[in-house]
Image: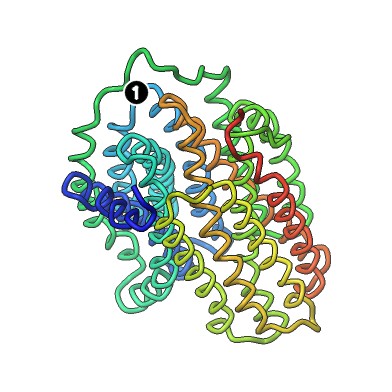
């Protein structure tokens, strides 16, 4: 097959009669989780004012995060042992049940139960989708699949907050949850035909041996990530102590949940998992603090301060789509280029974050960072499946997602600690950006080790 013919052939692999419903269903499933993720933050002030107290503001986020981490681990194990058929249907329905419970909540207890159900569904679903992609799509089509999955986050990032705000102000925050339920049912209906065609797992295939204490490891990871998430939303000494305890709890848990060699950038899967953590931790931490840089330090309006986030998302989407049309390019090379662009974009924030900085530079630099994410994240996902045997996809994808969640929570928490210690964004955020830039340089240096061992 020639390179020129590749885009048409790949499009057929994705949207031909046999896979059209599956592709649309996957994109819809990812988009629903993304809309919920982007919209809840906008609705949360009104929600808490209605049924809770400001002191409880962080708990709906923490409950979701803890449940998602726990489900990611156990969902990965389930998919490796028994296949993704039950999780692909059960996880979205569990997520939809969580939407119903949260959307009809009249008190904080019911809301938290709903958020836990949503987290369990979202965590399991994320792993099951990876396993489905490995089972259904040929290797040559996977870059385009991951490009679509990345794009599935862009529209929610752009439209989720304003739609959620409009719904909350004109109808009720309840419909931020309830309005998504019909789309969950549609997504499940689209995925069911593919699930029916999946054959049972080969009983002779190799499956990653169960690690001792897997459930305890999952609980430890859930508690640790939740504690880091809570600490990231609270300043002061107590938050620092909680973050320290979280790290102590996480250390033994991660030994059970990560492939060997992650922390020394072992060749192949260990570096792929490490890359996922670095990419997500760097990009989403800057994303979290960039509006504060522009609003708190340079006086931009909140609306204008959100523009770099939009252009970064568009850069991510465009780069993801581009790499999907070039399946013959080396994914290891693209991963390294992605890290280089992310390093450039992050380092550029050193010219934005200080009080003497030039705030308009956030726009071009964050386009570069978003482009790097579009190339790097999709390439990392491709390499993960390429190097995973049929009985390992769940374990490896769950490890990558935990690395993502852990690094993001830890670095956002570090930013909160610096703000509490130094007092102002102009003093604290340049230090945070310097650390994140060093992480991006590290990613650039080790990206070549993401290729399979020879």
| Residue topped by disc 1 | 82
Q: Position of residue 187 (x, y in %)?
A: 24, 51
* Residue 8 visible in this rendered orientation of the protein: yes
Q: Nearer the viewer, residue 278 or 334?
A: 334
Q: Residue at x 61, y 40 (%)?
A: 450
The quadrant in which residue 153 appears is bottom left
Residue at image x 34%, y 23%? 82
- In the picture, measured across the screen, residue 157 lies left or right of residue 220, that is left
Position of residue 49 relative to residue 238, above or below, is: below
142 or 348, nearer to the observer:
142
Residue 291: x, y in percent? Answer: 62, 75
Drawn side of residue 337 relative to residue 147, left or right:
right
The residue at the point 45 percent across, 32 percent down is 393
Q: Residue 347, image x and y in percent?
A: 73, 67
Furthest residue toward front = 2
Where disc 1 sits, the SS reads helix
Q: Residues within 10 Å of mark 1 (few under 14, many from 20)?
A: some
Q: Is residue 90 left or right of residue 396?
A: left
Numbered label tally: 1
Residue 202 in the image: above or below residue 429: above
Q: Quadrant of residue 308?
A: bottom right
Can I make out residue 107 in this image?
no
User: Which coloring applies here?
Assistant: rainbow
């Amino acid at each position: 097959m020639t390179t020129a013919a590749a885009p048409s052939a790949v499009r057929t692999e994705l949207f031909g009669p046999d896979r059209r419903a599956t592709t649309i269903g996957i994109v819809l499933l990812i988009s629903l989780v993304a809309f919920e993720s982007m919209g809840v933050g906008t609705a949360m002030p009104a929600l808490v004012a209605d049924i809770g107290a400001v002191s409880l503001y962080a708990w709906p986020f923490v409950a979701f995060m803890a449940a998602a981490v726990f489900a990611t681990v156990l969902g990965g194990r389930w998919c490796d042992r028994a296949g993704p058929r039950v999780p692909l249907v059960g996880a979205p329905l569990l997520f939809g049940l969580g939407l119903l419970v949260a959307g009809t909540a009249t008190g904080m207890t019911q809301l938290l139960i709903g958020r836990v159900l949503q987290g369990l569904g979202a965590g399991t679903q994320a792993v099951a989708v990876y396993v489905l992609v490995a089972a259904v799509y040929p290797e040559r089509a996977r870059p385009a699949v991951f490009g679509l999955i990345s794009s599935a986050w862009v529209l929610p990032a752009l439209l989720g907050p304003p739609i959620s705000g409009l719904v909350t102000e004109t109808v009720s925050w309840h419909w931020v949850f309830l309005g998504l339920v019909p789309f969950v049912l549609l997504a499940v209906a689209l995925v069911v035909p593919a699930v029916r065609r999946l054959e049972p797992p080969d009983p002779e295939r190799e499956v990653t041996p169960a690690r001792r204490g897997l459930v305890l490891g999952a609980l430890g990871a859930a508690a640790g990530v939740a504690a880091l998430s809570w600490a990231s939303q609270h300043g002061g000494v107590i938050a620092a102590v909680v973050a320290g305890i979280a790290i102590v709890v996480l250390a033994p848990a991660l030994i059970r949940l990560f492939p060997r060699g992650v922390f020394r950038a072992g060749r192949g899967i260990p570096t792929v998992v490490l890359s996922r953590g670095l990419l997500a931790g760097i990009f989403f931490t800057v994303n979290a603090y960039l509006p504060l840089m522009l609003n708190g330090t340079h006086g931009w309006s909140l609306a204008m301060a959100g523009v770099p986030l939009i252009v970064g998302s568009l850069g991510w989407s465009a780069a993801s789509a581009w790499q999907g049309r070039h399946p013959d390019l080396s994914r290891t090379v693209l991963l390294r280029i992605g890290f280089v662009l992310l390093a450039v974009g992050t380092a550029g924030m050193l010219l934005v974050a200080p009080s003497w900085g030039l705030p308009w530079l956030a726009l071009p630099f964050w386009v570069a960072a978003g482009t790097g994410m579009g190339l790097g994240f999709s390439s990392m996902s491709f390499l993960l499946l390429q190097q995973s045997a049929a009985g390992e996809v769940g374990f490896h994808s769950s490890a990558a997602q935990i690395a993502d969640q852990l690094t993001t929570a830890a670095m956002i928490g570090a930013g909160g600690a610096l703000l509490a210690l130094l007092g102002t964004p102009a003093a604290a955020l340049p230090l945070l950006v310097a650390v994140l830039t060093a992480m991006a340089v590290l990613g650039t240096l080790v990206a070549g080790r993401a290729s399979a061992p020879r």
